[in-house]
Amino acid sequence: MATIAGGLAGIAGAGGAVSVAVLRRKRPSIPAGHALLPQTDIDPLPGVLRLGLTGMTVPVAPGPHGELFLGPGQPQPGRTLRRLVLAPLFTRAQAGGGRLYRDQREPFRLVVEFGGPSRDAETLFRAYRMLDQQLRDHASLLSRCRGGVLTPRVVTVTVTGIVDVRELLAAQRDRYAFADATFDDIGSRSAPPSLAPSISESWSRRFGWDGREPITAEERHQLHALVRAAHDDGRTVRISGLPTGPRRVRAAIWTELGAAGVDVIADGDLSGLARHLRRHPVGAAPLPYLPTRTVRRHTPRPNARRETV
């Protein structure tokens, strides 16, 4: 939950003067905005940064030489996470004196989502080890965990998807990547905030409201209670997997998430999300609540299967 303000001071001293290009970036960043990208987007970073979003989930698949590749189909030369995301991201941070945006106070959340046809554990772990080495090349810009102490910096990298890296990460005393948690991990000793600092869940796993009618008092209370418990446990909350529908329907859900204090709202409607969060930033004065519909359920709604986010 700590900000990166302290860490940025040391980076800025070593990073040199801020470039003219960075000085001209007057549009403020959007701390709660997170981009969900389709697998077909093979060069996602420019659009995300242009909108001011401060996080994105990048689908990747392991390929030759342990590299992680973007885009559909077979791995293509040059279409790597290192070339299209990591290198330009860190170049921008260095040019900005240790910031991606002039007003940056929270880490940029880069979620690397392992996918692809391979389910071979050794292939996946080899790809993670390659990613780990690439991250260490930019150690001064990355949030790190050393001896169980988490120090936030400009970029926080989370690994998720078909590979469960918790055990591998927990064995690293000094590391630059983290795992995702769920609300079920609150208070867990096996997944402490130093290993999984962010809770990530699909909306549809716990909630049935689709934004078309007023939210029920029961689900609103549940949402607020879960977010409050996560914050008390020292974790941030990222919600994705929102119901599809017209933008006004999505905006109703974004509004409820913001009112509950959800730290990061992830969506594939990047421009709509950015516009909404600029008008209604999370953590600002609470908006008037939407009408609430009270319902009574005789049995709890079973949780749907968790989706990868």
Image (cartoon, rainbow, N blue to C red):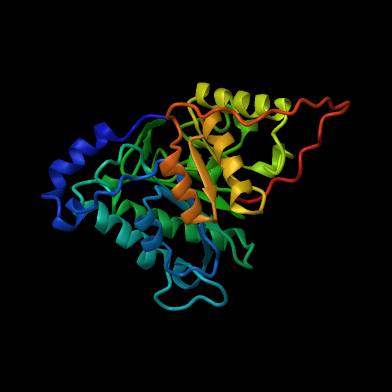
Q: Nearer the viewer, residue 9 or 20?
A: 20
Q: Nearer the viewer, residue 272 or 198?
A: 272
Rendered view: 290 above or below 238: above
Instruction: Provide residue 195's location: percent of width, then percent of height.
Output: 49, 36
Instruction: Provide residue 25's location: percent of width, then percent of height.
Output: 24, 52
Q: In the orientation shown, which residue stands out farthest toward the left?
A: 17
Q: In the orientation shown, which residue stands out farthest toward the right?
A: 298
Looking at the rendered image, the quarter that the N terminus falls into is: top left
Instruction: Provide residue 140's location: percent of width, then percent of height.
Output: 26, 45
Q: Residue at x 46, y 53 (%)?
A: 56
Q: In the orientation shown, which residue stands out farthest toward the top?
A: 232
Q: Is residue 105 left or right of residue 291?
A: left
Q: In this view, does 72 lie to the left or right of 107?
A: right
Rendered view: 131 above or below 221: below
Q: Which residue is drawn at 43% across and 73% down?
A: 79
Rendered view: 48 above or below 105: below
Specify the quadrant of the image occupied by residue 122. Answer: bottom right
- Number of numbered discs present? 0
Instruction: Provide residue 82's location: percent of width, then percent of height.
Output: 37, 64
Specify the quadrant of the image occupied by residue 74. Answer: bottom right
Rendered view: 304 above or below 129: above
Q: Nearer the viewer, residue 287 or 308?
A: 287
